[in-house]
Amino acid sequence: MRKKFFCFLSFGLAAVFSFGQDAPNLANGTQLSPNTAAAGKMSSSQVNHFTGTMGVSIPIYSYSDNSGLSLSISAQHSGGGIRTSEQSSIIGMGWYLNTGGSITRIVRGIPDDVPTYGFMYAAAIPTDFRSNGDKYYFDSLDTQQDIFQFSVNGRSGKFVIGKNKQIVLIPESKIKIQYTAQANQKITSFKITTEDGVKYIFDKGEMTAHHIDTYGDTYFKSQYSGYPHYGAWQLTQIISPFYTDTIKFTYTTKSLNTGFAYPQAIFVRNSDKVVTATFDATGTNTSSINRLTKITFPDKKQVDFIYSDAFKYDDTDNALSKIKISDTVFRYGYAFDYQTWYTGRGINFYGDSVDFDYPTNLLLKSITPYTLKEADKSYQFVYNTPYPNYHDHAFGNNDSVNNGYDHWGYFNGRNNSTKSIPHRYRDL
C-alpha cells in the first residue's frame, strides 16, 4: 500500500508565547490553546521556494462528490522551527491535524468584540495620545484591530473588522466572509462562502480567558484580564452550493487550564538610564477545548477520532490515538504512536559520561495505516534535537527560567539567568 516514509525533523527549539499584542501592551502575551495555536501557525506559514520553509503533509482521507463538496484530512508539520514556549498539539510538537479548517484570532489590545471597549464598539480613537497613554498601555483603550486568520479546505488568509463592521480580506479575495453577533456583543459564528458557492460554517467557538497571576493590580494589568472571549471558531458544517448535501463535524468540549509566563518587562528611568523595576509576570489561560470526535459525510461514510489513554499532549488532555474510516462497516484506519523520552549523554554522580533517559514534550513517532487484518508500513519520524520537557528540572526548566532564547523566541542554549532583555555595552 504505502512505502516506508522517514522524516528527519530538526527543532530550532522554542516554546512560543502566543503574543496577542505588539508592545507596549504588556498584558496581552497570552497563550492560545495548543491546537488553536497550531492552527494559527499553519495558517500563517508560507511553504514555498521564496521562504525556504519545509512542509510535511501525511494524507489521511480525501472526499469529493458531484454536489461540489470536498474535504481532505491530513497530518501536517510546520517548518521554520519551534519556539521555546510552544506546546504540543493533539498529535505532537510541531504537528497540526488538518480536518477542514478553523478561524483563529490574534488579539491586539482588547478583543475587538468586547462590549463597549473593543475596537468594533468603542468610540473613535482619541487624537490626544499623550493623556491617553496609560489607557493604551493597560488595555483600556483599543487602538488596533484584531487579526483573524482562516484556514478552510486548503485555502488560508487573514481579515480584519472595521468600526463600520465591514470585513476586509488580506490579501483581497473573491470569497465572502460574514459574522454573527448581537448588538454590542461577542462574535458567535462565521460563514465563509467560496467562489463556487460552497459554504463553510464556523459556529463552535473556543472560549478563552487569561488571568494575570502576579503584578495584576499595579504596573502589569489589563482591562480584560479574566474576561472570557472567543479565541477560535471551529468548522461545524460544509454545505453544497444548492444546499443538497452537508458534511457535519461533531465535537466534545472540555476545559483546559494552562500556566505561562508573560514577556519580561523593565522600567528604565530616562534621566540616568537606571533600571528601576523588572517584572516577570505569570498568568493562567483558561480555555474551552473543542475536541473533534466525528465527521459525517452525505454517502454514509464516517471518520471517527479516537483518543489515547496512554499519551497526553498536555497535563490534562489526551493525544489522538486512531483515526477510523468506515461506511456501514469499518474499512481502514491510521494509528498514531508517540515518544515522550529520548536517550542522551550526561554526567553521572561519579563524573562519567553515560546515557540518560530524558523526558520530552509529546513527539509524533509514527503513523501506521491498518485494516482489520493487517498493519501496513509506517510513516516514521526522527527528531534531530528533541525538545526538553518544561517539567524536567535537569534542564533548569529550559528557557522558561534561564531565558535561553533569542529575540524571536527560539532556543539558543544561553543561560541568561533572570534577564530576557539583552544588555547594551558601550564601547570605550
Image: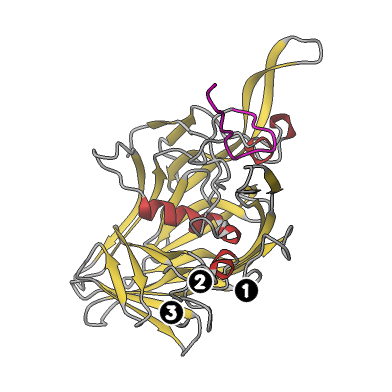
The residue stretch that appears in magenta: 414-428
Q: Tag 3's secondary structure?
A: loop
Q: Nearer the viewer, residue 61 or 276?
A: 276
Q: Specify which label sits upstream in the sequence, 2 or 1.
A: 2
Spatial CA span between label 3 and label 2: 9 Å
Q: Amino acid at mark 3?
A: Met
Point 35% across, 44% down: residue: 57
Q: Amino acid at mark 2?
A: Pro
Specify whether residue 422 is painted magenta: yes
Question: Could you say where residue 288 lies in the image, as x and y percent from the top left?
Answer: 60, 68
Crowd band around label 1 with a 10 angstrom C-alpha radius: few (<14), some (14–19), many (20+): some
Q: Are marks 1 and 3 in contact (CB under 8 Å)?
A: no
Q: How many marks?
A: 3
Point 43% across, 67% down: residue: 146
- Quadrant assignment, res 411: top right
Q: Tag 1's secondary structure?
A: loop
Q: Specify which label sits upstream in the sequence, 1 or 3.
A: 3
Q: Are marks 2 and 1 in contact (CB under 8 Å)?
A: yes
Point 49% across, 87% down: residue: 184
**Which residue position holds label 3?**
120
Point 46% across, 83% down: residue: 123
Residue 49, placed above or below residue 224: above
Say which mark, if any, is on residue 227: 1
Q: Amino acid at mark 1?
A: Tyr
Question: Could you say where residue 163 lies in the image, as x and y percent from the top left?
Answer: 38, 80
Say whether residue 374 is visible: no
Q: Tag 2's secondary structure?
A: loop
Say which mark, if any, is on residue 111: 2
Q: Specify which label sits upstream in the sequence, 3 or 2.
A: 2
